[in-house]
Structures are given as C-alpha cells and as structure tokens.
Amino acid sequence: MADYFLTAFEPSGETLVNERFEAENEEAAKMRGEALLKEKGLHSHTHRVVNAAGKLILFHR
C-alpha cells in the first residue's frame, strides 16, 4: 500500500480538504480520490490526487 494525498480548493485558493489515504496502485488511488470527493460534495471543485513523491495522479480544474 502506498500513500496518496487528496486536496480540493475553493476558486479563491482556500484549501477545503487536504487528506492522506492509502491505495494499492495509482488506478485505485484515482478511484478512491473520486469517491472521497463525491462523499464530501467537492467533485466539481478544483482538486488533485498526488502520490507521496508528488506525481500527479488526478487533476480537475
């Protein structure tokens, strides 16, 4: 399992969520990140999922 980080932002740049989670691989991390965003009602906000090394896995603007 590897660490991934989900961050979502307001249009002003304010951070709404900055959360760490674990996933088996990048595809699982992308799916988990999307699920977390839907749970929190933030799917339409600017968001990203990155791995612990900073590689961008998911991005929406």
Image (cartoon, helix red, strand yellow):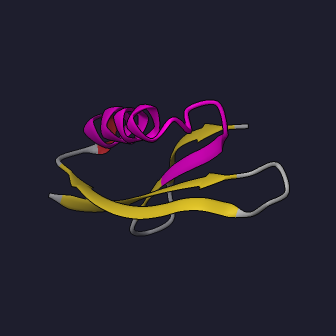
Q: Residue at x 47, y 56 (%)?
A: 50
Quadrant into which the N terminus falls:
bottom left
Pick the front one: 42 or 23: 42
Q: Residue at x 28, y 58 (%)?
A: 21
**Residue 22 vertical placement versus 48 (above, below):** below
Pick the front one: 54 or 36: 36
Task: Please tell me whether residue 45 belongs to the stretch shown in magenta.
Answer: yes
Q: Residue at x 38, y 36 (%)?
A: 39
Q: Is residue 37 left or right of residue 36?
A: right
Q: Position of residue 10 (x, y in %)?
A: 74, 51
Task: Please tell me whether residue 36 belongs to the stretch shown in magenta.
Answer: yes
The span picked out in magenta is 28-49
Query: Which quadrant of the view contains residue 36?
Result: top left
Q: Is residue 16 left or right of residue 30?
A: right
**Residue 14 vertical placement versus 39 (above, below):** below
Q: Residue at x 82, y 48 (%)?
A: 11
Q: Position of residue 31 (x, y in %)?
A: 33, 32
Q: Position of residue 61 (x, y in %)?
A: 73, 37
